[in-house]
Amino acid sequence: MEEEKRNNLKGKSDNLEYFREVETGMVEPRLRLLKEESQENLVTRTYYYPQKDKVKFTEEEVRKFSLDSYGESIPYIDGELTIFNNYLFDFWGYYLNAEGLALYGHLKRHAYGNKDWCFPNFELISQKMDKSRPTIHNFMELLERYGFAYKFGVWNLTRDGIEEGPIFKIRKKVPLLSKKLIYGDPDIFIPDDAPPHIKKALKKEQQGLPKKLRMEHEKYVKTMINNNEPVKMEVQVDFEGIYKQWLQYGELIKASQKNKTSKSNKTANQVKLERSMNEDEVKLLEYIKTYMQEKISKPSFDTWFANVLLKKDNELITVIAPNEFARDWLQEKYIEYIRTALKDLELEVAKIHFDVLV
């Protein structure tokens, strides 16, 4: 009898690959559309973003990876409810901040039972927390820095290698603070170009816990010792080093190599979707593009609208962008333009939705 195929980490049968992005030290130019105070019209500016390689992992490697393997965890067993030990709020809250604790809670609630991974909807989480997507990602970086969550990108090989929503490995047990986090490390260097949320974290790590919190932590540890519970406080847990070491188990894919592959996949997917568009959808898309060409510069049009597609379902219009970055930019900057174009057509539209090419 043929052995039953095990589901992937998302609970489905598709063949998935997982990856981590690694900065190369190189940058690549991207156009952004801006409204400057000195300009009446929208203008384009070139910004330079870090170029990143990717390290690929198999599903078995991601299943084996466990954040709970590092650092000394307090004696605490998780149940079916989303439960947090007071230690997390009393001491880790200083480093994670209230938003970081909330984000960890939203992630952990999806890693129920024996699962130490989840794949939540970040757009929904940002709405629940009433925080912007960039703010959510900043606190995700803090969770990774302190070993509470670790993000893996996902490629769906069954569906032509498209990139799906990420998988997050979640720490299930709360670790003890290291000695350097408790007492500080004055040798920590703070780069001038570090993002503000990382600079703030590094300054805290330089100084350690505030005096009152430090005293409370010493009381907590003394209570554990008096209760004959084993206490082994690490001097330091370097998750950045741990993550770098973990990357050796994956297969490095250079940015130039992956870009060629992605371009090919996007083209194939775009052709497939274009063929599925009916005559009304084609004409509507042509009208919107013509309208936008009259409203914005050619470089801006080529950047944001050249590869846009469209689907219409009764009074729902779905604008389909080639990637998440373009989708977010279209939704944030151009939705009113598109809505005006549709009004000029006297077209009844209840909702405009933005999606990504798959």
Image (cartoon, grey):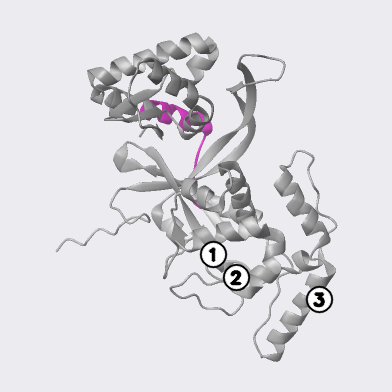
Q: Amino acid at mark 1?
A: Arg
Q: Are marks 1 and 2 in contact (CB under 8 Å)?
A: yes
Secondary structure, magenta segment, majority class: helix
Instruction: Measure how far apart labels 3 and 1 are at the Cα level.
Output: 26 Å
User: Is 77 placed left or right of 290 in the picture?
Assistant: right
**Dot 1, crowdedness within 10 Å: few (<14), some or many (≥20)?**
many
Q: Is residue 305 above or below residue 349?
A: above
Magenta segment, which residues? 249-265
Q: Position of residue 71 (x, y in %)?
A: 63, 69
Q: Which mark is residue 174?
A: 2
Q: Amino acid at mark 2?
A: Val
Which residue occupies 75% across, 64% down? Answer: 181
The residue under label 1 is 171
Q: Is residue 354 above or below residue 213?
A: above
Instruction: Measure how far apart labels 2 and 3 are at the Cα level.
Output: 20 Å
Which residue occupies 42% across, 26% down? Answer: 263
**Dot 2, crowdedness within 10 Å: few (<14), some or many (≥20)?**
many
The reply to whether residue 77 is in sight is yes
User: Is 18 placed left or right of 38 in the picture?
Assistant: left
Given this view, does label 3 or label 1 mark the residue nearer the observer?
A: 3
Instruction: Measure how far apart labels 1 and 2 are at the Cα level.
Output: 7 Å
The disc, 2 or 3, on the residue closer to the chain's N-terminal end is 2
Answer with the quarter of the image where residue 245 lies: bottom right
The residue under label 3 is 215
Q: Amino acid at mark 3?
A: Met
Picture quarter with the N terminus: bottom left
Q: Is residue 18 above or below residue 5?
A: above
Which residue occupies 79% across, 40% down? Answer: 192
Asked if residue 342 lies in the magenta stretch, the reply is no
